[in-house]
Amino acid sequence: MIKLSLVQIVGPYCGTHTEGEMLYRVIEPYINCNEKVVLDFEGVQLASSSFFNELFRHVIEHFGESVLNSQIAYASLKPRHQFVLDRSQPIASAS
């Protein structure tokens, strides 16, 4: 398992498609090796649905939807980040 700081990778504002793609490029090698990735939101001020949707799109296209639950986890989510995350995940993943 690898824990990655979003602030160090993307910065404190995870708000755009570009930032979602940037994060995907960092986690892709870990997913390729079947390693669980914990995304640490400590210090993140903003996390938007655009950011999550872009990240999820890449993961689903390259690895399938089940990887969202099996290999990606989240840490230090503020309630507002959790709210956006819950509404951004594909319906099958949210169950």
Image (spheres, grey):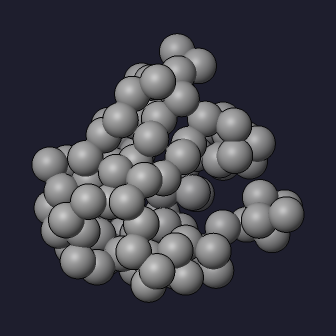
Residue 36: x, y in percent?
Answer: 54, 29
Q: Is residue 58 left or right of residue 70?
A: left
Above/below status of 59 relative to 53:
above
Residue for point 26% across, 60% down: 42
As drawn, which residue projects farthest toward the top? Answer: 33
Residue for point 24% across, 68% down: 44
Quarter assignment of residue 70: top right
Count of numbered tags: 0
Quarter assignment of residue 77: bottom left
Q: Is residue 61 left or right of residue 20?
A: right
Residue 49 seen anywhere in this rendered image of the structure: no
Above/below status of 4 relative to 94:
above
Above/below status of 55 relative to 5:
below
Question: For this rendering, which residue is in front, 55 or 68?
Answer: 68
Question: For this rendering, which residue is in front, 81 or 53?
Answer: 81
Q: Is residue 37 left or right of residue 3?
A: right
Quarter holding the C terminus? bottom right
Q: Is residue 62 left or right of residue 40?
A: right
Residue 83: x, y in percent?
Answer: 55, 82
Residue for point 57% across, 57% down: 56
Residue 73 seen anywhere in this rendered image of the structure: yes
Residue 78: x, y in percent?
Answer: 39, 74
Residue for point 54% across, 46% down: 73
Residue 94: x, y in percent?
Answer: 77, 65
